[in-house]
Structures are given as structure tokens and as C-alpha cells.
Amino acid sequence: MFEVGQEFIIEKGNGKDDFWHMLDGKFCSEAWDCVSRYIYAGLQGGSIMEGWMKEENEMIACCNDGTRPVIFKIERVDE
């Protein structure tokens, strides 16, 4: 379902409700279950994983599909 290097940008308050609709079906529901908590924290401006990663605005997470795992780098972009 994903390509190497593929990027998704989710913005808070963009009117499209990307977070609640998994990018209009462009995101695997199993993978979303694994990463959505980190994305939600980032959208609220919080630390994604303070003390776990070198940068508090980044997180590495993995889909729980054991036969086709996908690794995600999640990053809160502060502008």
C-alpha cells in the first residue's frame, strides 16, 4: 500500500479532517492504528516521544503486520 519515501502531511484545522478519515482511504487501517497516537500528539503540539528519540518532534513506529511490516518516521514540523 505504501512506497519507499512516500510522505503524508496532516495539518490541524485544514478543514479536510485528514486525521479522522485516515487521509480519505490512502492509509492502511492497521498501520494507522499503530501511528495515529503519535500523529495526534504532534497535531496538538505535544512531544511525540520525549526521552525516547533524540529529537522530541520525531518518532519511529512500525505497522504490526508481521509479514509485511512498514516502518514510519513521524515528524512534527514546527513552522
Image: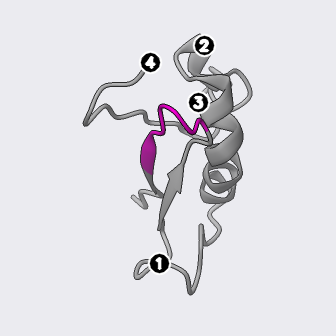
Residue at 59% x, 35% y is: 65
- Identify residue for label 3: 14
Image coloring type: one colour
Q: Position of residue 14 (x, y in %)?
A: 58, 30
> Mark 3: which amino acid?
Asn
> Badge 2 local density, few (<14 within 10 Å), some, or many (20+)?
few
Main secondary structure along the magenta-highlighted residues: loop
- Labels 4 and 3: the sequence-earlier one: 4
Tag nearer the camera, 3 or 1? 1
- Identify residue for label 2: 24
- Labels 3 and 1: the sequence-earlier one: 3
- Identify residue for label 1: 53
How far is mark 4 from mark 1, CA to CA? 27 Å
Tag nearer the camera, 4 or 1? 4
Q: Position of residue 21 (x, y in %)?
A: 70, 21
> Mark 1: which amino acid?
Met
Is 38 located above or below residue 18 in the figure?
A: below
How far is mark 3 from mark 1, CA to CA? 28 Å
- Labels 3 and 2: the sequence-earlier one: 3
Disc 4 is placed on an element classified as loop
Tag nearer the camera, 3 or 2? 2
Q: Quadrant of the N terminus?
A: top left
